[in-house]
Amino acid sequence: MSRLRIFDENRPDAPLSVHTDGAGIAHELDKVGVRFERWQAGQSIAPGASQDEVIAAYRGDIDRLIREEGYQSVDVVSLTPDHPDRAALRQKFLSEHTHSEDEVRFFVAGAGQFTLHIGEKVYDVLCEQGDLIGVPDGTRHWFDMSEAPYFVAIRLFTSKEGWVARFTGTDIADSFPRMVPHASAKAA
C-alpha cells in the first residue's frame, strides 16, 4: 500500500500524519510542489516485457508529462533482489542530495521509498505499483530501495546529464526509517 508519512525534521520517531489513500497523498504533496499521480496501463504488460512494451503501455500519460514539463527522454530501469550490485546501488542514494532537474519515477512494479526534506518537515513517500512521483529540481531528498530491491520504473528526464546527485553533506537521512523489503521482492 502506498503511504505518505510527514515528520518534523527533528522527530524521526513520531510522524505528524500518515496518509494511505492516493488522493490524500497527492493533496499533501501538492502543497509542497511535489507531483503524485496514479496511472493505469493502457494495455496489458507481460512479465519480462521489453522497455518499448512497458513505455507503450503508459504512452498517454508519458506524452502528457512530456507536453506539460518538457521532458526529452524516457527509459525503464529495473532491479531485483538477486542483483549482484544491489547493496552498492542502494547505498548510492541513501544520503540526502539534490538534482539540477526533476526526478520523475513511475512504478510499473515493485516499490521504492522517496524521502523529501522540505523546509522543516520530512515527507516519507512509499511508492508502489501504479504510483508516479515527481520530485522538483533542487529538492533535498534521498531514495531507498531496501536490502532486497524489487522495482520496474519508468524514468523521465530533461537531460540525463543533469541528473547527477549533489550530496548536501548532512546525516539527516540516517535518522529516518529505511524501507523494508517489499512483498513482491520476497516472491521474486
Image (cartoon, rainbow, N blue to C red):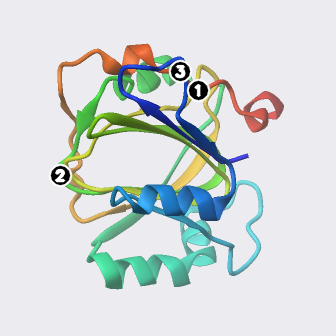
Question: What mark, if any, has residue 118 been given in the picture?
Answer: none
Say if mark 3 contacts mark 2, CB within 8 Å: no
Say if mark 1 contacts mark 3, CB within 8 Å: yes
Left or right side of 163 for 95: right
Kindly identify which residue carries mark 1: 179
* Residue 88 seen in render: yes
Residue lying furthest front in this view? Answer: 16
Tag 3: amino acid: Pro
For marks 3 and 2 on the same chain, the one whose residue lies earlier in the sequence: 2
Kindly identify which residue carries mark 3: 177
Q: What percent of the width, then of the height, locates residue 99? A: 21, 45
Check the image and report above or below for 159 versus 88. Answer: below
Q: What percent of the width, then of the height, locates residue 164? A: 20, 42
Q: What percent of the width, then of the height, locates residue 187? A: 83, 33
CA gap between label 3 and label 2 equals 30 Å
- The structure residue drawn at horizontal position 63% and vertical position 75%, both measured from the top left corner, is 57
* Residue 130 seen in render: no
CA gap between label 1 and label 3 equals 7 Å
For marks 1 and 2 on the same chain, the one whose residue lies earlier in the sequence: 2
| Rendered image quadrant of residue 155 | bottom left
Q: Select label 1 or label 2 by which is in front.
A: 1
Name the one closer to the observer, 129 or 7: 7
**Label 1 neighbour load within 10 Å: few <14, some 14-19, many 20+:** some
Which quadrant would the C terminus be assigned to in this image? top right
Name the one closer to the observer, 47 or 20: 20
**Label 2 neighbour load within 10 Å: few <14, some 14-19, many 20+:** few
Q: Select label 3 or label 2 by which is in front.
A: 3
